[in-house]
Image (cartoon, helix red, strand yellow):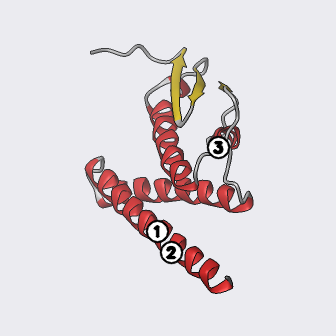
């Protein structure tokens, strides 16, 4: 029984490590695409890895994984931003999903800081979500930022 449990844990660990390496490769590609210089690449890549590390650390503290509320609170703390509000039923997604969601939220927050609502003193971000079964619909809404042209 103990050997079977150890084998299951080892299989799950291999699966998560494989996913993590694929995620790091994706981060590297995304950082390379959006960078014109090696310095820009290193900054972008490092910031994305820090975001991934923060999500992973939060998930490691809570064996059930970091909750949606916890993920957003960590993001607000990372960006030192008190102009974030959110609403939705708290839930703890699967750890792999949490990593992906954490990176998506990091990208949105980075863009809000550079070009969007958080680049203006009155800008705000509101995140809301609805959970129906295994589906989470999330909405990121920015107000008070620069006018979007295009």
Locate residue 88: give its quadrant: top right
Point out the frontmost of discs 3 and 2.
Answer: 2
- Do residues under tags 1 and 2 come within 8 Å of each other at their CB atoms? yes
Q: Secondary structure at mark 1?
A: helix
User: What residue sits 55% from the left and 27% below the top?
Assistant: 118
Asked if 146 appears above or below 71 in the picture, the reply is: above
User: What residue sits 61% from the left and 41% below the top?
Assistant: 79
Point out the frontmost of discs 1 and 2.
Answer: 2
Q: Secondary structure at mark 2?
A: helix
Q: CA distance from mark 3 to mark 1?
A: 23 Å
Mark 2 neighbour class, 10 Å CA radius: few under 14, some 14 to 19, many 20 or more = few
Query: Which of marks 1 and 3 precedes in the sequence?
Result: 1
User: What residue sits 53% from the left and 70% below the top?
Assistant: 12
Mark 1 neighbour class, 10 Å CA radius: few under 14, some 14 to 19, many 20 or more = few
Residue 21: x percent and y percent? Answer: 41, 67
- Classify the position of the N terminus by image quarter: bottom right
Q: Which residue is mark 1?
A: 15
Asked if 5 appears above or below 120 in the picture, the reply is: below
User: What residue sits 31% from the left and 14% below the top?
Assistant: 149
Asked if 34 appears above or below 50 in the picture, the reply is: above
Residue 133 lies left or right of residue 64; in this view the side is left
Q: Which residue is mark 3?
A: 71
Q: Which residue is mark 2?
A: 11
Residue 5 lies left or right of residue 114; in this view the side is right
Q: CA distance from mark 1 to mark 2?
A: 6 Å
Nearer to me, 42 or 109: 109
Nearer to me, 49 or 132: 132
Residue furthest to the bottom in view is: 3
Point out the frontmost of discs 3 and 1.
Answer: 1
- Classify the position of the C terminus by image quarter: top left
Q: CA distance from mark 3 to mark 2?
A: 26 Å
Q: Secondary structure at mark 3?
A: helix
């Amino acid at each position: 029984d103990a050997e079977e449990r150890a084998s299951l844990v080892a299989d799950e660990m291999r699966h998560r490590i494989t996913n993590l390496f694929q995620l790091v490769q994706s981060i590297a590609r995304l950082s390379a695409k959006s960078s014109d210089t090696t310095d820009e690449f290193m900054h972008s890549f490092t910031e994305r890895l820090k975001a991934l590390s923060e999500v992973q650390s939060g998930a490691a503290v809570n064996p059930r994984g970091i909750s949606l509320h916890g993920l957003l609170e960590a993001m607000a703390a990372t960006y030192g931003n008190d102009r974030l509000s959110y609403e939705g039923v708290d839930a703890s997604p699967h750890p792999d999903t949490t990593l992906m969601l954490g990176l998506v939220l990091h990208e949105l927050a980075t863009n809000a800081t550079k070009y969007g609502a958080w680049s203006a003193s009155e800008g705000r971000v509101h995140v809301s979500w609805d959970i129906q079964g295994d589906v989470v619909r999330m909405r990121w809404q920015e107000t008070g930022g620069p006018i979007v042209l295009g």
